[in-house]
Amino acid sequence: MAKDAARVARIVNETVEEGKNSLDLSNCKLTTFPVALFKVMKNVVANIHVISLENNELKLISGEFMTNFNQVRELNLAGNYLNHLPDEVKSLAHLTSINLARNKFSVFPHQLTELTTLETINLEENQITEIPVDSLASMPFLKLLNMKSNPLSSDSQRTQQSVLTFELLTRDE
């Protein structure tokens, strides 16, 4: 535990000192995003455009995380235990890519359909059965929705690619 905490501190300090525009806290065994990091990073938080919290033990991501990192363009939360997103995800007005693969979602996170800047949504290997096709079809920049390895209903799987303005991946091919 102390070794993981020291690793997180080192990565955050490097990010702050070097003025990096990305924060990679993948594989750090985080169960939550440490609130203290918002204070440490207050001078660089607006410059962070890429965040990876992949392969941690996150069961939830806070609204405070979303509002503090509202300049983020790419967010990788793959390989955690998330089953929903906070409403504050709507504050990510610059988000173009979100990776929520290998989590515990059973329902499509509908807040994502309100993020008009999104180009890529990855929800591979969750437990989602329905896709909100109508809402997704109205997203102006959406190019790719990866729903592979989800127990999609037969209606969702039959969604005609021809009516969609984005690429929908539903089967492992």
Image (cartoon, rainbow, N blue to C red):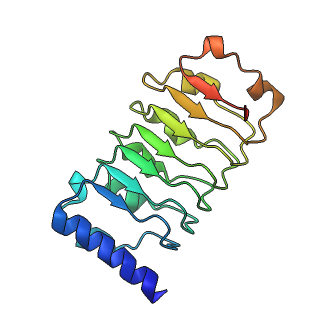
56 vs 58, nearest the viewer:
56
Q: Position of residue 159 (x, y in %)?
A: 71, 20
Q: Residue furthest right?
A: 154
Q: Is residue 152 left or right of residue 49?
A: right
Q: Residue furthest bottom?
A: 2
Q: Position of residue 26 (x, y in %)?
A: 46, 64
State the count of labels. Answer: 0
Q: Residue furthest front?
A: 173
Please indicate, yes or no, whether residue 43 appears anywhere in the rendered image.
no
Q: Residue at x 74, y 28 (%)?
A: 156
Q: Is residue 65 left or right of residue 19?
A: right
159 vs 16, nearest the viewer:
16
Q: Is residue 4 left or right of residue 155?
A: left
Q: Residue at x 17, y 64 (%)?
A: 18
Q: Is residue 42 above or below residue 129?
A: below
Q: Tell me which corner region of the image, top left, top right, bottom left or bottom right, holds residue 131.
A: top right
Please indicate, yes or no, whether residue 54 appears anywhere in the rendered image.
yes
Q: Position of residue 2 (x, y in %)?
A: 44, 88
Q: Is residue 116 above or below residue 28?
A: above
Q: Residue at x 32, y 55 (%)?
A: 69
Q: Tell me which corner region of the image, top left, top right, bottom left or bottom right, holds residue 152.
A: top right
Q: Quadrant of the C terminus?
A: top right
Q: Position of residue 62 (x, y in %)?
A: 46, 62
Q: Is residue 27 above or below residue 118?
A: below
Q: Residue at x 47, y 44 (%)?
A: 98
